[in-house]
Amino acid sequence: MALLEIENVSKSFGYVKALDNVSFQIEKGEVVGLLGDNGAGKSTLIKIIAGYIRPDSGRIKFEGTPVHWKSAAESRQAGVGVVYQDLALVNVLPIWRNFFLGKEVNKGWRILKFLDISNMKATSKDALANLGIDIPPVETPVAFLSGGQRQMVAVGRGVYFGAKLLLLDEPTAAVSVKETEAILNYISQLSKSGISVVFVTHNVYHVFRVASRFIVLDHGRLKATFRKDDKLAPEDIINSIASPL
């Protein structure tokens, strides 16, 4: 049974057809590269999977069950985590507050509840310590983190809160070479632990290192699907993206 099944999903915004009968599936523990030029429909598809927008037609199954998510909160509860390129982190807040943003831990009784700060600091510190990249003390405001460190905080947050499927939007954009290596290594670790990843990117060479399958969209339509096992080279995918539909 596939973890995620997309069947004939379409979405229009006025006269613009953002997705046109797109179908594919994601297996448990699989890393899939979602590729295509600007305007291909990648962002719309990710937002539909994450529950931010609803398709006009088609069907989505998650763990074999048809789903009709009305919000991102519903998809998160089911096990879908998404890390957008802007990361949805609050710069002025420290790392630990961002880690538990919207999922704060309280202690106390009835109306006398207050934030369990020590618990959240210790938990976020331990969770981020396993990501393979140098993270400053969790009291550090996010504004002082590098691009790669922000990515790891956002990805680590999704994993900690039980994501079965992670949607990563350009996770290696605008980060250093060392941080790119750490992010790619961590994505490989996620796959080995049974977490599925959809890796949205323009950098074919980055995703080629960690993905086993590649989906190419063009103007809202499924243009091609490749498997790395099929004697595939990154240039084959690049040529597919660049060629006319």
Image (tube, rainbow, N blue to C red):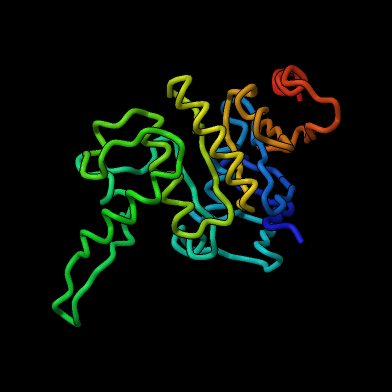
**The image quarter in which residue 189 lies:** top right
**In this picture, is 242 found above or below 115?**
above
Residue 164, given in percent of the width and then of the height, sits at 58, 56
**The image quarter in which residue 135 lies:** top left
- Left or right placement of residue 50 versus residue 212 in this view: left
Q: Nearer the viewer, residue 130 or 156?
A: 130
Total tally of numbered discs in the picture:
0
Q: Nearer the viewer, residue 158 or 220?
A: 158
- Left or right placement of residue 97 versus residue 181 in this view: left
Quadrant in which the C terminus appears: top right
Which residue is drawn at the image coordinates 19% and 81% (left, top)?
109
Which residue is drawn at the image coordinates 28% and 65% (left, top)?
105
Residue 149, given in percent of the width and then of the height, sits at 37, 34
Quadrant in which the N terminus appears: bottom right
Q: Which residue lies most toward the bottom here?
A: 110
Q: Which residue lies most toward the right here?
A: 230
- Left or right placement of residue 236 versus residue 182 in this view: right
Which residue is drawn at the image coordinates 74% and 48% (left, top)?
23
Does the rendering let one see residue 12?
Answer: no
Residue 26, given in percent of the width and then of the height, sits at 70, 50
**In this picture, is 107 found above or below 237?**
below
**In this picture, is 122 found above or below 41?**
below
Residue 130, given in percent of the width and then of the height, sits at 44, 44
Which residue is drawn at the image coordinates 65% and 33% (left, top)?
210
Does the rendering let one see residue 200?
Answer: yes
**The image quarter in which residue 187 lies:** top right
